[in-house]
Amino acid sequence: MRHVISPTDLTLSELDELLNLSEDIIKNPKKYSEACHRKKLATLFYEPSTRTRLSFESAMLNLGGSVLGFSSADSSSAVKGESIADTIRVISSYADICAIRHPKEGAPYVASQHSSIPIINAGDGGHNHPTQTFTDLLTIKNLKGRFENLTVGFCGDLKFGRTVHSLIGALSRYAGVKFVLISPDELKIPSYIKEEVIKARNIPYKEVRSLEESIPELDILYMTRVQRERFFNEEDYIRLKDTYILNSKKMDLAKEDMLVLHPLPRVNEISVEVDNDPRAKYFKQAEFGVYVRMALIMLLLRESEGRSIC
């Protein structure tokens, strides 16, 4: 049984197939309107979500399938002490494929070890968020036309930001990529990401504190919010939450074709005045999330059943 727990679970050729299929869905949505007829997607969200959960559900409905599941741990048997392993054994008999979000790193992997249906990691703690990464890659491919030879800046919470960790791992597989890591010292990228991904693949990078000084060299600026839910200390969150705010003045320093991405939700790290800048692509990015999840659902179901449903 094939699962997607990390973005690198797909080979580069499989990733190309996923992104090409996503772009064909964008161009020909009616072609896929019955691709998953009579198939059921289970969404097990032990942690709050708007875009990820609803885009998964929208994706399955767009494919002619149906959806079941829960949107918080409080509405599941987790409050009674049921384990992930037991939950997924049961869900495997109710649905054909499952998307799971959990606050604990590794929970989707545990689920995959006990599942008889494909598992998609919809975010586990500060670890991985593969479908957001695929969304980010589709956005870059569609709007930039390439992954190679890009200078990508990640700004904000690089310590807890699972979207950052996942995208760094994915982009590290392409030639000529450079990273600029912009954060306060308290929210710097984890050492294991630097050692096991960036340095291990000889990716040029630098760690800086100033967004203003870095933005002129960037092809892509990936903004993130400081996540209150990842902090144990409220005082630390309050002290750091407004460290970086992207506004029109800072955008004036950037290249004319730089893309501004953000996995959303935003709080105030991107001023609303930036929304009208043609380089601001975070709402388009959210739209692309539906198409890439449609493609992933189809490909995993096709592989699990040994036939083409595309």
Image (cartoon, rainbow, N blue to C red):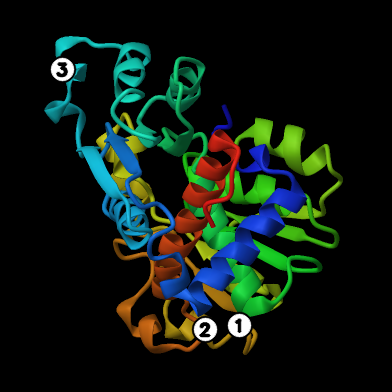
Q: List the residue tagged with mark 1.
A: 254
Q: Which of disc 3 and disc 1 is earlier in sequence?
A: 3
- Between marks 1 and 3, how big is the CA–CA gap? 48 Å
Q: Which of disc 1 and disc 2 is earlier in sequence?
A: 1
- Report the disc number at residue 279: 2
- Report the disc number at residue 79: 3
Mark 3 lies on a secondary structure that is: helix
**Residue at 81% across, 68% down:** 149
Q: Which of disc 2 and disc 3 is earlier in sequence?
A: 3
Q: Give how far across and how far down residue 168 sits, in percent.
A: 65, 49
**Residue at 44% across, 85% down:** 248
Q: Quadrant of residue 54?
A: bottom left
Between disc 1 and disc 3, the foreground one is: 3
Query: Which amino acid lies under the numbered mark 3 shown in the image of this protein?
Result: Val
Most foreground residue, 230 or 285: 285
- Between marks 2 and 1, how big is the CA–CA gap? 10 Å
Q: Quadrant of the N terminus?
A: top right
Between disc 3 and disc 2, the foreground one is: 3
| Residue 172, visible in the rendered structure | no
**Residue at 67% across, 73% down:** 218
